Amino acid sequence: MELHRRLAYVPGDVRLWPNLSGGETIDLLSRLRGGTVDGAAYRGRKDHLCQVFDFDPAKKGRAYSKGNRQKVALIAALATEAELYLLDEPTSGLDPLMEEVFRRELLAAVGRGATVLLSSHILSEVEVLCHRVSIIRAGRIVDGGTLDSLRHLARSEVSFAADGLDAEALARLGAVHDLTLDAGRVRFSADSDRIAEVLPTLGALGVQGLTIVPPSLEELFLRHYGDTPANAATQAAAPGEDHHGSRRHLLGARGRS
């Protein structure tokens, strides 16, 4: 029981007992981890989490959407004061507001002394939650380190309305790559750790409708390993897998130093 209490796991694909309510499922999972030993403290954590996740624990498992099934697993894990949280795509199915709640509650757990191992394809999530990152391909760690040390892997996609602007000044910046004019918008990629060099030029041009989109984790992988999207599409056995059937992962870790 003590071993279970030290570990909490959240899968990316949650299945529930259809005839148990969400609250009953949370209680069952928490009891298996030994997290309900202090009943009053557990109920306080559970009630708080149900409130901030906007979760109705009275409904039956069969009535929950994908996002609500994910909330059951997250609430059951976070209601248990574990020492180690193993999270596999934990925000799958959550909307942006609930993703922010998850991040806040997880960082609170870290503040209490917990350690987190997070597997995710959402680069922004990893950037917020993790101190160190490892990239896994075909079962091997092929790169890793602090987030700052991995910045060289990432480029952000930048676009804005053309509106007759002369964007050639951008092409001369070392951080700008693949500048094009497409469907009335100027588009280019920029080294993520050098975005600050680009912003003054964008401001001087008075651009409108500016968007800056960080790369998805899959895009980062494809760029890092020299794969092309076309090759990946023809070689993939399933989304997220390479042609050998080995899943690509980003594994992040966070804990108190």
Image (cartoon, rainbow, N blue to C red):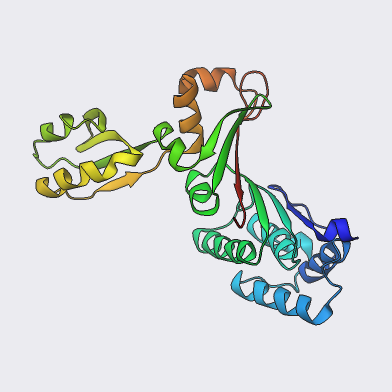
Quarter in which the N terminus is drawn? bottom right
Residue 150: x and y in percent read: 46, 36
The spot of residue 172 in percent (x, y) is: 15, 29
Say which quarter of the image contains residue 31. bottom right
Q: Residue at x 76, y 66 (%)?
A: 80
Expressed as whole percent of the image width and height from the top left, the position of residue 214 reads: 39, 42
Which residue: 11% across, 31% down?
168
Q: Position of residue 217 (x, y in %)?
A: 50, 37
Side of 251 relative to 21 (left or right): left
* Picture layout, residue 94 above or below residue 21: above
Judge by depth and name the residue closer to the eye, 52 or 128. 128
- Quarter residue 157 falls in: top left
The C terminus: image quadrant = bottom right
Up-down relation of residue 18 to residue 247 (above or below): below
Of 147 and 77, nearer the camera is 147
Q: Is residue 185 visible?
A: yes
- Would you say 92 lies left or right of 226 here? right
How many callouts does the rendering have? 0
Could you tell me which residue is drawn at 80 percent across and 58 percent down?
6
